[in-house]
Image (cartoon, rainbow, N blue to C red):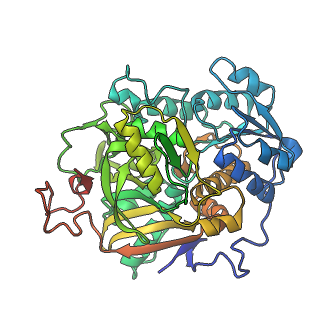
């Protein structure tokens, strides 16, 4: 049964009845100043027409600052100033102060630029800020001189929390708000309400109003594991070549994530730590685990409605940590509930081949990179959240967006980049509507408002129950396997060895 959440109720597949999948009429958000966009890759190029459609920004009040020529033709098409000036630790303050003043908005869609430094600058100037990925200056993920623990995303969590406290009432700055991290945090809340209604049909549902309420709702439903479950099936007729990395979204971003340690939230129901696993010894959330191996070589079992069961890479992502923290319940200074939270990602098939080649070349950077957009001939991106352990076993909720649907809604995008751009657009509009919220993570935003803005660009947004567990079809293995038959939701059962 397909479902959407709008204004606290379920509605059908269609966004409205006009057949074009767009909200009509759509009130345009008001920009108080200029918009500066960092980077003009696939997301930057795709979001430009969306910004002009859904806000009152004009081309004359926009400018793009980027590191290379990519995207210039799109900027020229819309009459947007295009500046090539790569940001570095030495020049970013000088460059940005030339173009930003109080009341402006910095939309960061770049890679290899420190989000922390940009945050501090924006808070000092009074500039609104959003990024789709919390990036660092070049070299962080591949610095072999650093211990494994210091190359995790969690290692920088304490610095982020300190910034949040310092700028509690500052200008709104939203971190990690694309598709995932970003939209998936709102999918979780929508999915929780679906499950709560369906397992407690005789009880009126009270929608939580704060973090503690949402965490206690998840606990009351006995949800043990949350997976961000994604399967990308987009294909192109052009074969991948040797020493070429092919992907449907930022290749630089994926190369960086793939070499970071596999990292995820560790639930209180877990019985034993993996032999190659470590819980962090410092920081606010001790329920985050990392493994002594890169996410690009670690696989787990997952499920989506269209694909069914599949193996996916256990990629480090900020939403696994923020979800783990947000849904933790503490009583008498003891953690009594926290789910296991994983990002299970199966990229497009050419990206899988590229990732394997990247690994067997000992993580040497590929000679060539090819982002596939216009040459995709078919396929979709299923991106959602899989909530497991409740009375109805498992529930997937999310976006199933085909390449055909993506092309109907905006140019210069594929299904994957459109999901990211939709999340960025929704977060940006929320920031314009809420300009004094300080530094925010996706969970801090109004999930209904965000989904209402993003929904027209997400294809079929629906939920589906399934009897699948990680022990599915494993009764007669060809080789010995280490499983926990008494509790199917143990991490060892998800792990592909």
Side of 381 relative to 168 (left or right): left
Find residue 215 and report its horizontal and vertical position in percent: 40, 56
In the image, residue 149 sits, relative to residue 435, either above or below, namely above
Q: Nearer the viewer, residue 258 or 266?
A: 258
Where residue 11 sits in the image (x, y, percent)?
A: 58, 78
Direction from residue 60 to residue 407 in the image, left or right: left
Outermost residue, top direction? 90
**Position of residue 131 measured from the top left corner of the image (x, y, whole percent):** 62, 42
Using the image, determine if residue 259 lies above or below residue 4.
above
User: Which residue is located at x 55 percent, y 54 percent?
Assistant: 179
Q: What x and y, as percent, mark residue 360?
A: 34, 38
Q: Quadrant of residue 378?
A: bottom right
Compared to 356, does 311 lie above or below? below
The residue nearer to you, when weighing 463 against 402, is 402
Q: Is residue 442 left or right of residue 204?
A: right
Task: Give the quarter of the image for residue 65.
Answer: top right
Can I make out residue 8 in this image?
no
Please name the residue shown 86% across and 42% down the image.
Answer: 61
């Amino acid at each position: 049964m397909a479902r959407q959440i709008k204004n606290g109720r379920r509605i059908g597949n269609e966004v409205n009845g006009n057949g074009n999948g767009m909200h009509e009429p759509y009130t345009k958000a008001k920009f108080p100043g200029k918009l500066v966009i960092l980077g003009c890759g696939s997301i930057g190029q795709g979001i430009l027409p969306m910004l002009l459609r859904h806000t009152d920004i004009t081309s004359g009040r926009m400018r793009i600052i980027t590191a290379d020529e990519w995207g210039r033709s799109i900027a020229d098409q819309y009459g947007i100033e295009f500046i090539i000036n790569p940001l570095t630790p030495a020049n970013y303050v000088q460059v940005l102060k030339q173009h930003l003043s109080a009341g402006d908005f910095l939309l960061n869609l770049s890679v290899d630029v420190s989000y922390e430094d940009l945050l501090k600058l924006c808070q000092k100037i009074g500039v609104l800020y959003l990024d789709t990925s919390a990036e660092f200056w070049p070299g962080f993920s591949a610095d072999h001189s650093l211990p494994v623990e210091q190359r995790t995303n969690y290692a920088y969590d304490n610095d982020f929390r300190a910034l949040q406290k310092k700028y509690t009432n500052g200008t709104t700055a939203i971190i990690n708000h694309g598709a995932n991290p970003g939209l998936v945090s709102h999918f979780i809340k929508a999915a929780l309400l679906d499950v709560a209604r369906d397992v407690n049909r005789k009880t009126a549902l009270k929608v939580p109003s704060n973090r503690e309420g949402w965490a206690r709702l998840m606990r009351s439903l006995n949800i043990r594991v949350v997976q961000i479950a994604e399967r990308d099936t987009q294909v192109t007729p052009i074969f991948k070549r040797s020493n070429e990395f092919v992907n449907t979204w930022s290749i630089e971003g994926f190369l960086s994530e793939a070499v970071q340690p596999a990292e995820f939230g560790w639930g209180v129901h877990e019985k034993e730590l993996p032999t190659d696993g470590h819980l962090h010894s410092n920081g606010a959330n001790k329920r985050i685990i990392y493994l002594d191996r890169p996410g690009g070589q670690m696989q787990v079992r997952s499920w989506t409605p269209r694909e069914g069961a599949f193996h996916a890479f256990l990629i480090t992502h900020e939403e696994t940590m923020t979800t783990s923290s947000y849904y933790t319940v503490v009583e008498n200074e003891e953690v009594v509930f926290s789910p296991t939270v994983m990002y299970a990602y199966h990229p497009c098939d050419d990206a899988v081949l590229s990732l394997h080649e990247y690994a067997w070349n000992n993580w040497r950077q590929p000679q060539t990179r090819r982002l596939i957009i216009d040459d995709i001939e078919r396929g979709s991106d299923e991106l959602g959240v899989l909530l497991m352990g409740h009375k109805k076993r498992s529930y997937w909720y999310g976006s199933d967006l085909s390449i055909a649907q993506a092309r109907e809604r905006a140019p210069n995008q594929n299904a994957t980049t459109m999901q990211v751009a939709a999340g960025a657009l929704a977060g940006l509009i929320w920031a314009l509507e809420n300009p004094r919220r300080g530094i925010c993570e996706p969970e801090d935003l109004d999930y209904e408002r965000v989904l209402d803005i993003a929904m027209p660009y997400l294809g079929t947004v629906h939920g589906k129950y399934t009897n699948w567990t990680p022990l599915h079809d494993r009764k007669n293995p060809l080789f010995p396997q280490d499983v926990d038959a008494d509790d199917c939701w143990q991490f060892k059962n998800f792990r592909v060895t």
